Image (cartoon, grey):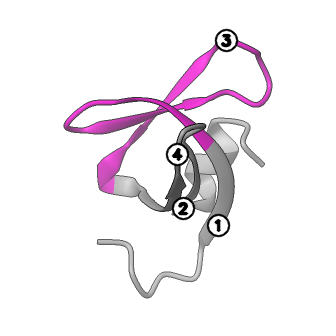
Amino acid sequence: MIAGRSDLVDLDIVIRRETDKAWGIADPNKIGNILWLPKSQCEMSNVKRPRWSATLTCPEWLAKENRLI
């Protein structure tokens, strides 16, 4: 999928929703808003319950587009 690419960033996020094709994460810039990120472009790791905090790995361009960095 995205292994071996140097333009990846790791972000600490909170998972709010999930579909077969996307992750819905809490928008750090607007309380109550959900940002949808395609699973085809992202990986989740270190998922912790019950708060559903996790580490999101995604391309830098996608993080910038969604104002995550």
- Classify the position of the N terminus by image quarter: bottom left
Q: Please provide the residue range marked out in magenta.
A: 14-40
Image spot of residue 64 (x, y percent): 69, 46
Q: Which residue is labeled 1 in the image?
A: 9
| Discs 1, 2 touching: Cβ within 8 Å | yes
Q: Which of 13/40 is in front? A: 13
Q: Which residue is labeled 4 in the image?
A: 49
Q: Residue at x 57, y 82 (%)?
A: 6
Question: Residue 32 bears which disc, if any?
Answer: 3
Q: Residues within 10 Å of mark 3 (few under 14, many from 20)?
A: few
> What residue type is disc 1 on?
Val
Q: Earlier in the sequence, mark 3 or mark 2?
A: 3
> What residue type is disc 3 on?
Gly
Q: Which of 32/3 is in front? A: 32
Q: Which residue is labeled 2 in the image?
A: 59
Asked whether residue 48 is drawn in magenta, I would say no
The residue lying furthest to the top in this view is: 32
Q: Earlier in the sequence, mark 4 or mark 3?
A: 3
Q: Earlier in the sequence, mark 1 or mark 2?
A: 1
